Image (tube, coloured by chain):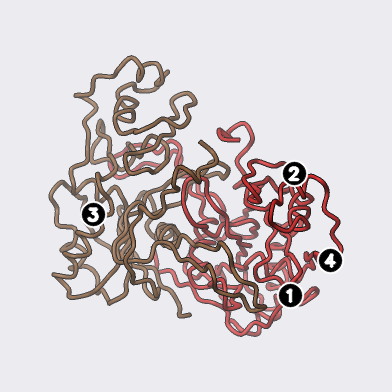
Chain colours: A red, B brown
């Protein structure tokens, strides 16, 4: 097993709808075959125009009720993004998104939005976003890279967020060790590692939240595979908690 | 933000109770100030003798009932390690440990056990294990390193496990960005990043499960702080799910 390096892509400008992020990355990084690019969800959402202005939002009665002292327009946007509310406490809403992810505010976020008074929504299809970026990077650089789209999710029983994969292309997502044997001969029965989530979390360590570094390169993984972040969604029949 | 490198410590022998892991690491790695060592829980548990032989275990009626087709002695050990059962389905038991962690089998595991017919338990106090290893490494090398003890935990709504921190010393565990501002001036209200969990997951990417590489070095983090994995345990009043 070789060493892994994780490096931020520096000098990206503030991103806007329609920006060609692949070209911006290709100009600033020397990609190698097998690299995995981790791109923060906010960057993808911005170039895809997944921004809502609070100005034009008319909150429903339900949104007003949930919002309490908070902004009912924000809650209205959360409700529109949610397929199902999982828990609410005050203005904290934990919801299932159209993609099947369960997270705070259905992924709707005001931090790092393009300007005050706007909210950023999750990409409509983050796996497709990853695949598109990967394909365009291949056009530009002839390199075969994997792409992970990351977002910061909370966990029910652990404080703080970790970055996880909400989109993936050309990268191993789940590594199933079932049937392999440990050094004493014990057969691993149900060891499946969420590689793509660990990659996303590792990249967060160099990206930071505040300094406009939404892309990092993970080099040294042997993880060039077909993979989709949909593999990470727990099927309803295995969900023991909601 | 600098580049991060993650490298496995190679050539460690199979570990036994009483082994001096710090010396084994110091002989095999050139540590630098600020490095974070990630050590798999199994390695700590083995040197601390946290091993149970199934032979001597007498299963209770409750263990027999939960075990179904499985080994009731294994379930008995799980029940003894559990402070509280959170969910059960068949022989899958999700439990809260004495440390407050919620995980499958209360952390009891048969894979990578020292020999067939044995189970590995979590360390009694993984923060203390980390602190002890850190202090002894400082004695041996004069280096100030952080230590994270990692284990693989499942997540309620996501497939696969990721490695998280169950013990920590000399390393930032939670990074609280509350009160800081993003580039547009938006104040981050509740952004707390579980740095130590992301470090554990990153290290897992080079450690593997099968090839006896229970220690990795993460270099390039600016994360030398006081920290304890107990900070990661969600307080009961904020737990919305069990």
The local crowd at label 1, few if under 14, some if 14 to 19, many if 20 or more residues have their Cα within 10 Å, is some
Q: Which residue is mark 2?
A: A83
For the residues tagged 3 and 4, is the chain the same? no
Q: Label 4 to label 1, Cα distance in Å?
A: 12 Å
Q: Helix or strand or loop: what does disc 4 sit on?
A: helix
Cα separation between marks 2 and 4:
23 Å
> Which label's residue is closer to the chain start, 2 or 4?
4
Label 3 sits on residue? B128
Q: Which mark is residue A55?
A: 4
Query: Residue B231, how many percent across, how many down?
Result: 39, 55
- CB atoms at circles 4 and 1 under 8 Å apart? no
Q: Nearer the viewer, mark 3 or mark 4?
A: 4
| Label 1, label 3: how far apart the Cα atoms are | 46 Å
Residue, disc 1:
A115
Between disc 4 and disc 1, the foreground one is 4
Q: Reading the chain from its start, which is encountered first: label 1 or label 2?
A: 2
Q: Say whether marks 2 and 4 touch (CB < 8 Å).
A: no
The verdict on a common chain for dots 4 and 1 is yes
Above or below B108: residue A153: below
Nearer to us of marks 2 and 4 is 4
Checking the image for residue A29, the label placed there is none
Would residue B77 be found to the left or right of residue A71 on screen?
A: left
Q: Establish whether labels 1 and 2 are both on one chain.
A: yes
Q: Are marks 1 and 2 in contact (CB under 8 Å)?
A: no
**Where does residue B18 sit, x and y in percent of width and height?**
12, 49
């Amino acid at each position: 097993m070789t060493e892994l390096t994780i490096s931020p892509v520096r000098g990206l400008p503030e991103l806007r709808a329609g920006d060609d992020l692949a070209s911006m990355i290709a100009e600033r990084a020397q990609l190698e075959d097998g690299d995995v690019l981790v791109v923060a969800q906010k960057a993808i959402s911005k170039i895809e125009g997944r921004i809502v202005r609070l100005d034009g939002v008319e909150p429903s009665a339900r949104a007003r009720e949930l919002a309490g002292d908070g902004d009912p327009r924000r809650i209205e946007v959360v409700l529109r993004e949610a397929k199902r509310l999982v828990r609410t406490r005050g203005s904290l809403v934990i919801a299932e998104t159209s993609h099947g992810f369960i997270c705070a505010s259905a992924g709707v976020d005001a931090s790092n939005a393009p300007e005050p008074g706007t909210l950023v929504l999750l990409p409509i299809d983050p796996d497709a976003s990853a695949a598109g970026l990967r394909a365009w990077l291949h056009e530009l650089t002839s390199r075969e890279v994997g792409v992970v789209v990351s977002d910061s999710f909370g966990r029910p029983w652990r404080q703080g967020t970790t970055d996880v994969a909400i989109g993936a292309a050309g990268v191993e997502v789940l590594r199933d060790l079932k049937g392999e044997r440990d050094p004493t001969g014990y057969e691993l029965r149900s060891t499946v590692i969420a590689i793509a989530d660990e990659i996303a979390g590792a990249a967060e360590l160099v990206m930071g939240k505040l300094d406009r570094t939404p892309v990092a390169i993970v080099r040294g993984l042997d993880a060039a595979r077909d993979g989709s972040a949909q593999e990470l969604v727990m099927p309803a029949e295995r969900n023991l908690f909601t």
